[in-house]
Image: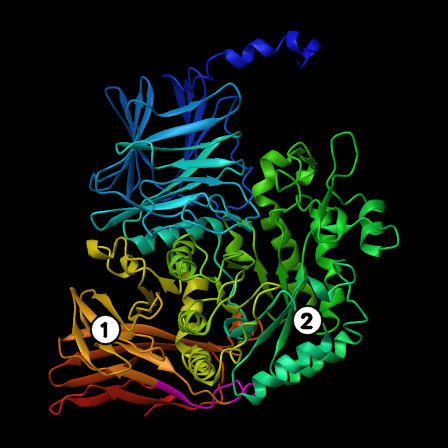
Amino acid sequence: MLQDTSFAIHPGKEKQNQKALIYQDVGKVKQYKRTGNGFLFICENAQVAILFYTNSIVRIVMNPKGEPQLDKSKVVVANPEQLLIKEQIINDTIMLKTNRIKLHVQKAPFRLKVTDRRGRNLLVEGARGMAFRENGEVAVWKEMDKDDHFYGFGEKTGHLNKRGERYEMWNTDVYAPHNPETDPLYESIPYFMTLRQGKAHGVFFDNTFRTVFDLKKSDSYYTFSAEGGQLDYYILAGPEPKAVIEQYTYLTGKMPLPPKWAIGYHQSRYSYETEKEVRQLATTFIEKDIPLDVIHLDIHYMDGYRVFTFDHDKFPNPEQLIKELHDMGIRVVPIVDPGVKKDVEYKTYREGVLKDLFCKYIEGEIFYGDVWPGTSAFPDFTDQKVRKWWGEQHTFYTDIGIEGIWNDMNEPAVFNETKTMDVTVMHRNDGEQTTHRELHNVYGFLMGKATYEGLKEQLNGKRPFLLTRAGFAGVQRYAAVWTGDNRSFWEHLQMSLPMVMNLGLSGIPFTGPDVGGFAHDTNGELIVRWTQVGAFTPYFRNHSAIGTVYQEPWQFGGKHEEIMRKYIQMRYIWMPQIYSLFHEASTKGLPVMRPLLLEFPNDKKTYNLNDQFMIGDNVMIAPILAPSVTDRAVYMPKGEWVEIETGKTYAGEQTHLIHAELDVLPIFVKRGTAIMQTEWMSNVKKSPENMSMHVFAGALNESYRFIFYDDDGETFAYENGAYLKLELEVTCSEHGVEVTVVNEQGEYDPLYKEIKLNVIGLARNQKVKINGASRINIV
């Protein structure tokens, strides 16, 4: 029999039987005052600040410990605009209004209702509003309408519409199978969009603690809460879904325009372990006429997994290798993890210790955790001095011609029971020390910031590429995101579509899964179907794990190789269209790969459409996502849709049965619109000499406007006017098709001097007309 120890009479033991901590309401308003664009409400138990950023964006901050702190965000880059805000008191309610949004503040107790200018409810606090607990937790309750559909939340598994789910934001290394119930994952994006009867609004909860969004507990309300900090959230009034994304990325920033090579095809494996293997890989792609822009090097390229090193037995001359591959049109992207091996003979570790750059406990001891190199220390990226030092370390790579980096294990992942750093570690936090419990979710984000800014400074005007596994809201400013350690299962191919679409709705346009699946063994049919999808996924990388079958396009026999070659080449044929959409993403924040609801928000049949997606506003992809399937139902939204493979036209607002053999990806273009394409030439010669505009003729007296954008694809010269931007309009009627150059901007001089016009589906009585002057002739 086990004997009791003195712990049996520990004075805190009886607390285990006490009731759970009770939420404390903010109470009634005692007084309030105006402060510029904002208002401060002194309530019985807390203080609440309301601050207007634009006519459509308002910030709510509740602090139970004192006056709300408005300058602590790690990610918001916007400042409040000068606005006309009307203030009115009606009985027990204070009305605060811009020309787009109204806040109704009930005084006793403090409750908030937000409506648009026409009185449409956006967010309503009912019997419960904002509250807090003694342990530091903060929470808010909002009413849920029966017609509400929820999207966003960043990187989450499951279906497109997140109603009925509960999500946690805590960056976590998850190698176990990613099922619909797997949560949390690597990214924490505490933001969502609500779509109700065709109108949308959004919420961004700017809190870096572990947070929870509960859309599951009730059909009449939802909650979001955090373990600590302030209740600090932004309301984005929309009213269109696209407007919500633009408002969110106005706050958290937009992605920089990536280099064109980063938008091409990437080949990776854990790992290509020697120079010989990498050279043979590159040569095989060239010989087989399969396009390739990037080869990734996983952890085996390093000396004992030490970052900023090469294993000189396996990679005796990396600089020569990188030059040879660059001459073949291929870049090398090596992996860089945050863990720095504890080794006094290792320069990076010595510098980190001597310059006091690693994460520490409050008593001054360095935090050590086991990762790939063994016992390792972790840079404290919350400190500007550390971020600058870490960025400077990348001269090790940039000096030998590397232009892109892959950040992994940056949740941060640690091989222990919690999977991460001790939450009691203290971060410097640029002079305001706080715990890892508070800043865990931004560790990977700040590593990305350090890496991207270091690369940008070192590349002499060239655009860097950064890929990251972990991040927080705003990560799009620095990195592309892949969806982590998926599996070679058909279910994971299916799940990747809503995952990438919700990441796009969460302000991260440059994202995609590991094509073919990372773990487990893929097969020929699965990787063909996945490559077809990948050709239209913003980030296009084939990646596989150690111990699994190799996944290069030629590993599954000649038939499958030929199909994969076709679709990898197709990625480059479509590059002008895709690159123009990346430009739009960099200026407006809109995703490249979109759920249909983004373009057709009034069509309820699009609200949970998980297995189709849009590329831009006029191209729809309906891939095959199950084995041995050659026929599938495809829902066509409003309009008429032309299937590229067959030329057949389908009526909108109907579901059609579409046939697609293994070598066919069903692609549809809306009639009356246009796409831009070029031709696949060779891996080395990637600057197109020919450009084509394909117009899909309609006859409904409709006009379609779009932007064709181009630049050198490699430098930041576009920021100084070295770009080509054509605003084009296509007008289709029963009499003909008219293409008009509405506007032209920029000074970039491409190799092509004309755009060849190809009109598809032109009726006999329709004629083609070209208007508008341009130095790029349309013929």
Amino acid carrying label 2: it is Ile
- On the question of residue 319 being in view, the answer is yes
Magenta span includes 336: no
Disc 2 secondary structure class: loop
Q: Main secondary structure of the magenta part?
A: loop
How packed is label 2: few (under 14 Cα within 10 Å), some, or many (20 or more)? many
> Residue 476's x, y, as percent?
51, 56
Q: Nearer the viewer, residue 324 or 493?
A: 493
Residue 724 appears in the picture as rendered: no
Q: Are marks 1 and 2 in contact (CB under 8 Å)?
A: no
Q: Magenta region: which residues?
A: 682-692
Relative vertical location of residue 736 with respect to residue 23 in this rendering, above or below: below
Query: Residue 213 placed where, x, y %?
Result: 41, 37
| Label 1 residue SS | strand
Label ID, residue 658? 1
Residue at the image position 79 percent from the left and 67 percent from the top: 311
Task: Classify mark 1: residues with Cα within 10 Å, few (<14), some (14-19) or many (20+).
Answer: some
**Distance from the alpha carbon under mark 1 to that under mark 2:** 44 Å
Magenta stretch containing residue 689, yes or no? yes
Q: Quadrant of residue 3?
A: top right
Rendered location of residue 193, percent (x, y): 34, 47
Q: How is the image coloured?
A: rainbow
Vertical arrangement, residue 113 with respect to residue 597, above or below: above
Where is the C terminus found, in terms of image quarters? bottom left
Q: Is residue 253 left or right of residue 126?
A: right
In primary-sequence order, the first of circles 1 and 2 is: 2
Q: Nearer the viewer, residue 643 or 520?
A: 520
Q: Position of residue 151 (x, y in %)?
A: 35, 49
Q: Which residue occupies 60% across, 82% down? A: 329
Q: Is residue 384 left or right of residue 285?
A: right
Q: Which residue is mark 2?
A: 402
Amino acid identity at mark 1: Ile
